[in-house]
Structures are given as structure tokens and as C-alpha cells.
């Protein structure tokens, strides 16, 4: 029996273009994979917490310790939403959430920032545009807690936001909808990380670091008069206070302002402001620092730094108080690069401290913790060994929080992941806590290259900062990244068409591994260095010949090079250094290239190229993909559209309706033996992701407004030759997504 409801549903299903509806999921790398500069618990609603990242948006904590992304709708227009420079969760109405977003304050991001306002704990947002840029991925991005965006806990319509770049302090009195500059606040921060930098990145002012309301100075319903503001000044006044809600400000007397104040956290029951400082803005630096406490009642500052002398070789970042246990606080070394990160805990307001580890007798460490990387095995001892530079506890430790409702529950962010646990009180009894990688659901990697060969794992990746993976499963975290050579950032990966277990991958010169070309003949399970590569050459894009014996390499700074049988790479003088390259997947001697409006062909194994045809008015080709079973059948995306040739580039068909295209891919055909499905990130009356099942005549959009993939030009695509409709989108900040019809 078919009930009415079912038949109506079926009818709707038939009418809607169901075949084009895609299901998108993250390929699970697990463990985050990047810097988590901020984690904030709501102080009113138990279990409500958020994490912000520098390039991958913000996340909400779930009851099972996993995280859910909040900003996946960010698209080519709104890509800078993924740079979250500050986050505030409302202590009065917990449904209200605010994110200060924008990626860079220099030319790398042409857009001003905005405050994203949610009234439904992050399910939906509206944007309040700011008159200046916000830098979620700029220096000093961890230098804030309770964040440079703060909500008055006594009158939650009032928010303050401390801007970068000398733009000063801003205030809203209407829940973040409109903002006005606080003209009485004039010390907007002079510190610049590196005045010699000319890119605008390290030579911009960090500005205002944090805003902390002293809720004890008022009561519910009455705007808080006493507010502390930390400013990125080094060696001059850097903590200011108002006692009249911001009409006038003064420097907090008696404060030693030698270092940059990274955090200012109030312990309301003690009426104490705790401050951590470092001699650098972070996130990578810091060799000295201080922890201070300010007794608001007496006006007395006390230096409570946990270590001194030669034990003090780092600055302080993370700072948290246990709201249930006044006087209990923890601080993190921002960067203790060797032998490992460090965290200190005090239960008496900083009079005495105990560390997370201590030397037993060098080189043996007493680790007052157990460690689990079960949710992201590639993070842990299986991958990161204990040699100097590879750490278990972490680095870039700016985010450190104790759950305000649960003294046992804590989380901290590192340069690579989120750690935490549920037995923190054991620190005070057994002095031994469980630390677990708890970044499940956070995928914040920058994907540089993806391949889906016809055999072996369906997906292999080249990834920024964490190297890359063979994704044997899309739903469980890989046990290990690519190793031997191990590179922080791999810039590209390719496979040989006729021998698809043969791979090449390229490093970016960020390790001591020497050669930046690696070869595999077992689908990436093991690798060897390509001794044909010179030590000082790295980066760029790579193409492996059909039989796997020839590597064509467009390097980042040394032009296009080619090598057969791992002989020394030789310059390919017939190609410009900006050339886009690809290999034929059938014929071992054939390679393709494009630059400007020219399409090039090589029939001698990449040694020489000749201009074969023209790509219309294109000035910058993006990608060439080749039909895996037909030599000479190529697609080229450019700033002027999408082009298809079936004669090795002698002539091209311009795909109608597409004005610009970025990443493209060919995947399994809709019908057996048919032409591959074509995928493109393209502007087709709107920037989106499209699939064509008829060689580019008609296209279906495969993403929607809930799934924007950030900046189109930064993304990579590959399509699965084994599964019709399956496409993989590698993003710049939100890891890899796979989509199925
Ligand atoms: C301020 O702090 C610095 C660094 O800890 C220290 O060297 C200096 O002596 C302090 N100044 C005063 C006046 O205490
Ligand atoms: C702060 O100073 C006041 C006045 O001297 C004192 O009574 C109070 O105990 C101090 N608070 C803390 C947490 O030390
Ligand atoms: C803490 O507990 C773990 C797990 O039981 C153990 O391996 C470690 O040795 C303990 N640390 C110390 C210092 O006893
Ligand atoms: C690499 O360095 C060597 C020695 O300094 C130099 O001779 C060679 O030209 C360099 N190679 C490239 C491709 O720049
Ligand atoms: C591969 O291409 C070359 C150059 O066009 C051609 O000479 C050769 O016959 C082709 N090989 C095969 C197996 O088709
Ligand atoms: C990008 O997202 C914004 C805001 O969600 C939306 O208004 C716009 O239409 C989207 N643009 C495209 C090209 O999809």
C-alpha cells in the first residue's frame, strides 16, 4: 500500500532535478590539520563551545566531543569568512554568536571584514560589514581571550571589537548590527612583528589584542562600567581600563608592560585579572614572557610566572581559569619548541605551579599524562616521532580552556589540532591526566593537489602543512601521512596513466629532506627520492608520463624541468616558467602545456614543446586535464573560459556559457564506454561547481548555497574514474569534500 504522503514525496522527487542533487561530505583526515587559535565556552549554557580557525572557518562542539562546521556556505564571494579573527558567544542569550571574519589586512584579501551575527548558535548568519579589513590569518591571530570581540555580560546588546592595523576600538549597542569607533580610545597598538617586511603581512600593526569586561563592576541589566583592553604594545603601556563603560580610559597603573599581552582573563569570584604575555605576537615566535595577576580591589600586580632563568625560553599564550574553582588556572607556553610544548596548572592563584611534564634526568621526561591519537593516528607517535621538532603536546598553544560547567573537561588548540580530556582534576590528585586528540570534525587543511587513479586507493592528496595522504578510507582518519620523504607541504601529485600505481609527488623545500621529488610504485604506500632532482629546487606542479618513467615539473622558481629514468632534471627551454603542464595518460612520450593564449605539445617526452593551437583570448590558463583513454583529447580551463580539443590542441571548441574556469576534472562516464563526466569550477552565469555528462554541451550545478567551497581559484578538483558522479573538491582551509549524486 502506498500512502498519500509517500506518493506526494515521490511526485516532488520526480519534478525536482534529483539527478543533480549532490551529497557532500568531508574526506576525513581528522585531527584538524591546522592552527586552532581560539576555543570559547559559553558561560551560561552547559556544553556550548566554539572553535575558530585561521583559514577554515568556525566550528561548534557536539556532545560527543566532535565538531560541526558553521561556515561551509562561504563561496567565491565570501571566502574571507573562513578567516575567523575573533569569536564571541553570548553569556546572556547563548543562542547569539558573533564572528569577526576576514582573511588578510594586506592586498592578499581585497575585501573588508565583517562581523557575522547568528541568533541560532551558528545555524545561520547575517553579515555586518566593517569599514576596514580583518585578518584571521595574520600574525597575532591567537592573541586574544576572551577574544578581541567581547559581549557585555550585564547588557548583551553591547559589544566591543578591537581592530588591527591601528583602526582602534569599535562598539556596538545593537547586538553587532551597527558599529561606531570609540573615539576616547586612542592607544591603538604600535607593535609590528617585522618592520622590514614589504608585503603588508608581517609589517602590519597587530592592534588591539583583547577586550575583557569586569562583570563584577555592575549587575545584570546595567552596562558594565569596568572594561580592560589589552593592546599590542611592547615596552609601553599595553593594558587599559575604563570605569565608565568606555567614555574615558587610563593605563592600568603598576603594570610591567615589557611584553605583549596575549590574554586577559577575569576570575570574577577572585576579582582578579590574569594576564599572559610574550615577547612576540605569535603564533610561531616567543622566547620570553610573563604571567601576571592584577588584584582589581587592591590595584596590585603580582608576577606569577611559573618558571624563571634558563627554564624560561618561551612566551606565554593560552590562559584559562576554572570558574568553578576560584584560584585554579592554567597557562600554556606559546611555543616551547623543544623538547615539547608545556602547560602549567595552579590551584592557588599562581603562587605555585605544576607542569605537564618535567625532566626526570635528561633526556628522560616525566610525562604527567597519557596520550591518545586514536581519532587521528597520523598525528601521533606513529607519525610524529620524538625527535626534536616533532612534538606530542604541541606548539602555537594560544587556545586553552576549562569547561565552565565541568572542571574535568578541558581543551587546547595547537598548530596542528585540538587536544583535551575529561579527567583534568586528576592533575591535582595523581598528577596524571589523559590527553586525547579531540579535533574530530575539524578539517582545516589547505589542499594543493588531488588524484583519483583507476587502481589503488580512490583518492590521494598533496596537502599544505601536513604533507598528504593515501585515503584508503574516506570516512576514517589515515593512520599515517606520506613519509620518507616527509614534507610539511606537498604542492602536487600525479599518477602514470598506463601504470597507475606509479606516482610522483613534489615538496616545497620546507624540510631537510633534500630532494623535493618523490616517486612511488605502490600507490603511495612507500616512496623514494628522485635523485635526478637538485637540492635547491622545489614546489610547483608535476606531471608523470603514461608509463611512469618521465617527470615533467614546473617548479616554483626554476622554470620547467624534465627528467627520464631519474636522470638529472634538465631545463625545458621551450616553455615559459608559468606554464601549466599535463601528461598524456596513454602515450608515454606526449605531454601538454599551456601559457598565455598558447597551447603547447611535446611528442619527445617533454624535452621540447611547440605551440600547437590557440586558447582564444586567454591570458592565464589554470589546468589541463586529459581523457584517460584517448590520446590528444584535452580540456583546458582559463581566465577566459573552458576549451576542449580532440586533436592534441590543434583546434579547440570553446564551451558555451562558461566565461571563466578554474579546477577541472574528468570522471567515470554516466554510461559504460561513454565519454567521461566533465567537472568544472566555473563561472557560468554565476560561480559554481558543474558537471556535464555530454562532453560539455549541457551542465548541471552540483553545489548549492549551503556548500560554497570558499575561493574557487584556490581549489583543486579530481573526479573518480571508478564511481560515476563522484568528485573530490580540495579547498584552501576546509580540507577535502567528496560529492556523490
Ligand atoms: C619588568 O619585566 C621585565 C621582564 O620580566 C623585567 O626584566 C623587569 O625587571 C621588570 N621591571 C620592573 C620594574 O619590575
Ligand atoms: C585582593 O586584595 C584585597 C585587598 O588587599 C584582598 O582582601 C584580597 O584577598 C585580594 N584578592 C586576592 C584574590 O588575592
Ligand atoms: C601517567 O600515566 C601514563 C598512563 O598510565 C603513564 O604511561 C605515565 O608514565 C604516567 N606518568 C608518570 C610520570 O608516572
Ligand atoms: C642549485 O645550486 C647549485 C649550487 O649552488 C647551482 O649550481 C645550481 O645552478 C642551482 N640549481 C638551480 C636549478 O637553481
Ligand atoms: C605516441 O606518440 C608518438 C608521438 O606522436 C608517436 O610517434 C607514437 O606512435 C605514439 N605511440 C603510440 C603507442 O601510439
Ligand atoms: C555566495 O554566497 C552569498 C551569501 O551566502 C550569496 O548571496 C551568493 O549568491 C553566493 N554566490 C554565488 C556565486 O553562489
Image (cartoon, grey):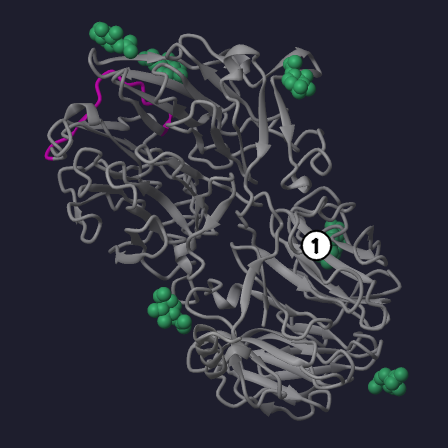
**Quadrant hosting residue 517:** bottom right
Which residue is located at x 63 percent, y 54 percent?
Answer: 463
Can you tell me whether the CB of the residue at mark 1 lies under 8 Å from the nearest atom of ligand 3?
no
- Mark 1: few/some/many CA within 10 Å (<14, 14-19, 20+): some
Residue 105 against residue 425 in the figure, above or below: below
Question: Is label 1 in a helix, a strand or a loop?
Answer: loop
Which x, y percent locates residue 370? 63, 23
Query: Which image quadrant for residue 51?
Result: top left
Question: Percent from the top left, x then y, of residue 500?
Answer: 82, 67
- Nearer to us in this view, 239 or 669: 669
- Relative placement, left or right, of 399 versus 576 is left
Residue 355 painted magenta: no
Query: What segment carries the magenta color?
Result: 247-262
Answer above or below: position of 560 versus 38: below
State left or right for residue 647 relative to residue 188: right
Q: Quadrant of ligand 5?
A: bottom right
In the rendering, at what x and y percent does residue 128 appear?
Answer: 25, 56
- Is 484 placed left or right of 217 in the picture? right
Residue 204 is at least partly visible in this image: no
The residue under the point 44% across, 8% down is 352
Identify which residue is drawn at 32% across, 27% down. 264
Tag count: 1
Q: Can I make out residue 379 in this image?
A: yes
Q: Which residue has dot 1 on it? A: 473
Residue at (56%, 83%) from the top-left corner?
Answer: 642
Amino acid at each position: 500500500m502506498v500512502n498519500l504522503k509517500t506518493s506526494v514525496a515521490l511526485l516532488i522527487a520526480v519534478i525536482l532535478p534529483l539527478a543533480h542533487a549532490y551529497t557532500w561530505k568531508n574526506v576525513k583526515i581528522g585531527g584538524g590539520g591546522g592552527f586552532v587559535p581560539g576555543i570559547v565556552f559559553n558561560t551560561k549554557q552547559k556544553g556550548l563551545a566554539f572553535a575558530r580557525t585561521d583559514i577554515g572557518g568556525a566550528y561548534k562542539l557536539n556532545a560527543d566531543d566532535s565538531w560541526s562546521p558553521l561556515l561551509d556556505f562561504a563561496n567565491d564571494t565570501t571566502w574571507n569568512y573562513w578567516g575567523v579573527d575573533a569569536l564571541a558567544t553570548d553569556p546572556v542569550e547563548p543562542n547569539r554568536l558573533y564572528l569577526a571574519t576576514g582573511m588578510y589586512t594586506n592586498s592578499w584579501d581585497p575585501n573588508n571584514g565583517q562581523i557575522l551575527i547568528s541568533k541560532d548558535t551558528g545555524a545561520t548568519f547575517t553579515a555586518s560589514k566593517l569599514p576596514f579589513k580583518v585578518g584571521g590569518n595574520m600574525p597575532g591571530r591567537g592573541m586574544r581571550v576572551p577574544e578581541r570581540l567581547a559581549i557585555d555580560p550585564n547588557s548583551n546588546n553591547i559589544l566591543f571589537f578591537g581592530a588591527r592595523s591601528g583602526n582602534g576600538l569599535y562598539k556596538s549597542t545593537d547586538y553587532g548590527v551597527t558599529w561606531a569607533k570609540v573615539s576616547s580610545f586612542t592607544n591603538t597598538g604600535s607593535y609590528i612583528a617585522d618592520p622590514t617586511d614589504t608585503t603588508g603581512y608581517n609589517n602590519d600593526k597587530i592592534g588591539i589584542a583583547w577586550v575583557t569586561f569586569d562583570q563584577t563592576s555592575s549587575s545584570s541589566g546595567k552596562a558594565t562600567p569596568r572594561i580592560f583592553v589589552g593592546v599590542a604594545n611592547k615596552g609601553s603601556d599595553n593594558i587599559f581600563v575604563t570605569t565608565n563603560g568606555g567614555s574615558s580610559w587610563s593605563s592600568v597603573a603598576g603594570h610591567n608592560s615589557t611584553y605583549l599581552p596575549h590574554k586577559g582573563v577575569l576570575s570574577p569570584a577572585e576579582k582578579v585579572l590574569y594576564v599572559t604575555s610574550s615577547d612576540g605576537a605569535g603564533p610561531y615566535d616567543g622566547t620570553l614572557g610573563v604571567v601576571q595577576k592584577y588584584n582589581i580591589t587592591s590595584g596590585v600586580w603580582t608576577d606569577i610566572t611559573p618558571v624563571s632563568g634558563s627554564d624560561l625560553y618561551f612566551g606565554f599564550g593560552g590562559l584559562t581559569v576554572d570558574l568553578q574553582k576560584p584560584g585554579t588556572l592554567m597557562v600554556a607556553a606559546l611555543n616551547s619548541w623543544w623538547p615539547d610544548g608545556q602547560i602549567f596548572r595552579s590551584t592557588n592563584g599562581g603562587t605555585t605551579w605544576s607542569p605537564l611534564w618535567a625532566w626526570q634526568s635528561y633526556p628522560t621526561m616525566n610525562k604527567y599524562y597519557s596520550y591518545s591519537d586514536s581519532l587521528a593516528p597520523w598525528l601521533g607517535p606513529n607519525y610524529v616521532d620524538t625527535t626534536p621538532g616533532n612534538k606530542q603536546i604541541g606548539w602555537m598553544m594560544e587556545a586553552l580552556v576549562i569547561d565552565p560547567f565541568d572542571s574535568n573537561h578541558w581543551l587546547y588548540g595547537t598548530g596542528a589540532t585540538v587536544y583535551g580530556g575529561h579527567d583534568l582534576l586528576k592533575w591535582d590528585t595523581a598528577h596524571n591526566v589523559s590527553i586525547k586528540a579531540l579535533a574530530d570534525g575539524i578539517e582545516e587543511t589547505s589542499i594543493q593537489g588531488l588524484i583519483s587513479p583507476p587502481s589503488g586507493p580512490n583518492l590521494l592528496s598533496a596537502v599544505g602543512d601536513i604533507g598528504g595522504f593515501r585515503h584508503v578510507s574516506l570516512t576514517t582518519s589515515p593512520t599515517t601521512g606520506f613519509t620518507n620523504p616527509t614534507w610539511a607541504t606537498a604542492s602536487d601529485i600525479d599518477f602514470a596513466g598506463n601504470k597507475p600505481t606509479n606516482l610522483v609527488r613534489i615538496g616545497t623545500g620546507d624540510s631537510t629532506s633534500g630532494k623535493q621529488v618523490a616517486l612511488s610504485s605502490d600507490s603511495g604506500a612507500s616512496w623514494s627520492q628522485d635523485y635526478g632532482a637538485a637540492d635547491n629546487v622545489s614546489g610547483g606542479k608535476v606531471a608523470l608520463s603514461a608509463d611512469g618513467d618521465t617527470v615533467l615539473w614546473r617548479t616554483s622558481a626554476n622554470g620547467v624541468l624534465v627528467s627520464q629514468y631519474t636522470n638529472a632534471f634538465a631545463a625545458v627551454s621551450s616553455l615559459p616558467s608559468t606554464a601549466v603542464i599535463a601528461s598524456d595518460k596513454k602515450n608515454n612520450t606526449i605531454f601538454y602545456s599551456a601559457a598565455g593564449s598558447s597551447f603547447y605539445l611535446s611528442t619527445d617526452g617533454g624535452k621540447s614543446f611547440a605551440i600547437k593551437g590557440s586558447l582564444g583570448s586567454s591570458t592565464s590558463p589554470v589546468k589541463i586535464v586529459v581523457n584517460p583513454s584517448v590520446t590528444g583529447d584535452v580540456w583546458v580551463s582559463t581566465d577566459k573560459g573552458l576549451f576542449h580539443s580532440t586533436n592534441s590542441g590543434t583546434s579547440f571548441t570553446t564551451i558555451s556559457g562558461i566565461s571563466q574556469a578554474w579546477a577541472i576534472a574528468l570522471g567515470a562516464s554516466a554510461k559504460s564506454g561513454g565519454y567521461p563526466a566533465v567537472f568544472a569550477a566555473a563561472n557560468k552565469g554565476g560561480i559554481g561547481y558543474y558537471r556535464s555528462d555530454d562532453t560539455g554541451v549541457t551542465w548541471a550545478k552540483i553545489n548549492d548555497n549551503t556548500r560554497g567551497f570558499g575561493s574557487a581559484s584556490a581549489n583543486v578538483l579530481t573526479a573518480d574514474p571508478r564511481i560515476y558522479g563522484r568528485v573530490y573538491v580540495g579547498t584552501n582551509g576546509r580540507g577535502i569534500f567528496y560529492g556523490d549524486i
